[in-house]
Image (cartoon, rainbow, N blue to C red):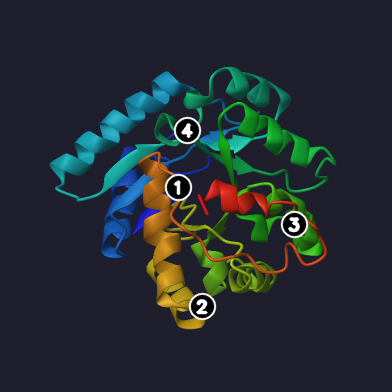
Amino acid sequence: MIDLHSHLLHGLDDGSPTLENSVAMARLAVADGITHMTCTPHASSKYTFEPALIAERMAELRAALAAETIPLSLGQGCDFHLSYDNLQDAQQHPARYTINGGEYLLVELPDFGLPRTMGETFYELRLAGMTPILTHPERNSTIQQKPEILHEWLRNGLLLQVTGDSVTGQMGKIAQKLAHQMLAKRWVHFLSTDAHDTVRRPPRLSAAREMVAKKYGAEYATRLCVENPQAVVEGRMLPEQDEPLGLYDDEDYAGGPWWRKLFGR
């Protein structure tokens, strides 16, 4: 399995505090069946995003994994917060923030008070050559109350990443319910760990994959945990996706919905 969202690098944000802890997290990930983790420290007003320091921590972790013969491949990106300064810089230097310098960008919404112009923000990111992946919408309090907010964004090509622990109920009943609603409608494109530590939020994904396979089909589970994230880390277009349900029933789209163009259908 390929994990697109983790706070594995030490001493950068609220994730791993030490290199030793990062190595312990890596061991847990491998034991769970994860073969690749993308290191995505926060880029926010609280946690300064420093590419040079991140590169240093990446090198340290790769060396430690090699020394311990832990078979985990690493990629690099960030957990991008939609501040004015971030948006301005990302439009000028997209590869600074995207996963492995490609087109895909993990985006985290504010917990409260989503601006009405959020759709325009996603559109501006796309104009700058980035494809936004919205992280853990099932855990956002505003979306939990009004999940229909996602309709327009999805119609315009936004991708969704759900946390594995939300699927299994570790993130609470509300997050679990919304996660399964979105999975049933085939709105979800990725399952990731959003791992922060070895105990409270460890890097585990296999239980969520098994649950998705049982309830929604093994092919869909493999797409969310292997095929789609592999395309992202390799900088490729996603493979063909199932048609999302409930997004176009009340709309007249000349030429078909945007997602068909996005996925080459």
Whether residue 170 is visible to the viewer of this picture, yes or no, is: no
Rendered position, 213 above or below 140: below
Q: How far apart are marks 4 and 1 (CA)?
A: 12 Å
Helix, strand or loop for disc 4 = loop
Q: How far apart are marks 4 and 3 (CA)?
A: 34 Å
Q: Mark 1, residues whose alpha carbon is within 10 Å: few (<14), some, or many (≥20)?
A: many
Q: Nearer the viewer, mark 4 or mark 3?
A: 3
Quadrant of the drawing holding the N terminus: bottom left
Q: Where is residue 168 in the image (x, y as percent from the top left)?
A: 52, 73
* Count of number-bearing discs: 4
> Residue most toward the bottom?
214
Question: What residue sits right under mark 1 in the picture?
Answer: 6
Q: Mark 4, residues whose alpha carbon is within 10 Å: few (<14), some, or many (≥20)?
A: many
Question: What residue sits right under mark 2 in the picture?
Answer: 216
Horizontal side of 113 relative to 242 (left or right) equals right
Image quadrant assignment for residue 203: bottom left
Q: Mark 2, residues whose alpha carbon is within 10 Å: few (<14), some, or many (≥20)?
A: some
